[in-house]
Image (cartoon, helix red, strand yellow):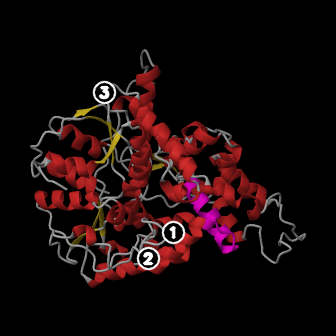
Amino acid sequence: MAETTTSGEATNGRSSTLPEEFLEQWRDVAYNCFSSGHKFCREVCPVTQVTRDERFTPTAFHANVIAMEKGHLSIEDVAEDYVNCTMCGACELRCPNTLFTGDFYRFRQRTIDVVKAMRAFAVEQGIHQKNWQRWAELTDRWGNEPVLGWTRETSGSKVRAWAAGLDIPTGGETVLFADCEAAFKRPSVPRSVALLLRACGVEFGLMDQQWCCGGPMWETGYVDIAHKMAEHNMIDWRKTHTKRIICPDPHDYITIIEHYPPLDENFDEFEIVLAVDLIAEAIREGRLELGTPVQRTVTYHDPCRLNKRLGVWQSPREILRAIPGLTFIDVDHVTQWSYCSGAGSNLWVEKPELTAEISRRRIAKAQELPGVDGLVSACPWSERPLTEQGEAVGMDVFDIFEITAEAAGFEV
Amino acid sequence: MLVFRLSAQRPPKPERVTDVVVTRLEHVLEVDPDLMRKHVAQQDIPNWDMHRIVSARWEHIRDIHEQWADSIVLAGEGSELGAGPPEPMGET
């Protein structure tokens, strides 16, 4: 435990106690959790399912705030504990303080925001997680996340390389925002989205210089870099007179709707849309025909950001049920509150073995379903660890847009 | 479809239901905000998030019923339980 003076200042000159503005913001949710003692969060938490480590439970994340307020702990003691969270949102959704009373009181559990705030506080105090720090530095330097490794640059000039040959214009009223992971690591996803949107009759362009949405920077505590990314992107949108942003990746969607408005008083001029909703609507209205059978037996993985964080679970299922030839074995979206790929909040960058185990268990659940040899997800970040674990056991992992593009007759 | 526009997230003005309950969104009852100014302040929850919580509750209850209930007993005639879950989230 860090040595402290009686005022709570660490003797190394850092203030390791929580500042008053932090407590003003998070004291109430911390006590709301700690004093209620519900703990419904435990078994839905993918990290708790694997580690059974009390330090990494949502309860501990809140109890630490109270302990730090009382001087029993410092940020040095617990900073690394807060790494162990995918920010899937299962805990705060399942908590009765959200699920049964959150709307009545307009006061819900906010575990994700508490974890973000603690991680940011740790960074402010100079406590860094080695890989996250490197990830943040490279994102800042290149404009996009180092999803191809530490030495392969992912600059803004290369972020639209996935669109080669598609003749997509720059800018315009609607742009397609392809996230770093898909753009560089799994280009078949944005290509599929682009082809499908075109087939639906949606006109769109790409940003002039797209940078990372900033989400992983907010999630890992590098708030200044996140702000820089966001401000750059909004300037780019205005430069090309963009009013509507289509997000294939739910991480981008959540980052933009939660974090961008406080940075820009005119944010109301933008409309943010999920690509999965657009495609489902197009199928429903007959504007997109899926005429090529896909003879597979698959199940669907509800990505956390889509299902738990946004409540979007119907559109992907509607799409899958419209694909001819496809046998779709569903697991309902409420059961999937306790499922996770383990990829969220860059956990895999700092704790790859933990992400691998969470994903292994998710693949194992898919294997239990009769005849299933394919898992479809709707989030490129989840598809990385799921694909790795799936390869080990012969389970193919698809992105929903890839399989839909195939059904629409496209070769991607 | 979950289309996000910032101005659509601000809740409408509350309408009084009882001396301690108000309503802003259809089928959603809320505590009188004046009762949450002294000890615990309310949060700024956008409309899409309120709809998410309400929908999730209905979906959770339906899941519990399907898994565990042999029969479902309504609280009384005209109970809101009989109203069923709200429509899926539309434009917010």
Residue B11: image location, x then y, percent = 41, 59
Q: Which chain is home to disc 1?
A: A
> Is disc 2 in the same subunit as disc 1?
yes
Name the one closer to the observer, A185 or A341: A185
For the point 38% across and 66% down, the residue is: A180
For the point 78% across and 63% down, the residue is: A74
Calculate the distance from the C-alpha at mark 2 to the C-alpha at mark 1.
9 Å
Residue A305 in sight? no
Marks 1,3: beta carbons within 8 A: no
Residue A45: image location, x then y, percent = 56, 42
- The quadrant the C terminus of chain A occupies is bottom left
Label 2 packing within 10 angstroms: few (<14), some (14-19), many (20+): many
For the point 65% across and 39% down, the residue is: A52
Calculate the distance from the C-alpha at mark 1 to the C-alpha at mark 3.
40 Å
Tell me the kind of residue under disc 2.
Met
Determine which residue is flagged by label 2.
A229
Query: Tag on residue A86?
Result: none
Name the one closer to the observer, A346 or A176: A346
Q: Is residue A20 above or below residue A378?
A: below
Foreground mark, 3 or 2, reads 3
Residue A77: image location, x then y, percent = 76, 59
Q: Is residue A77 above or below residue A36?
A: below
Q: Quadrant of residue B79?
A: top left
Label 2 SS: helix
Determine which residue is flagged by label 1.
A217
For the point 84% across and 69% down, the residue is: A8
Query: Tag on residue A371?
Result: 3
- Where are the magenta residues, as a range? A110-130
Marks 2,1: beta carbons within 8 A: yes
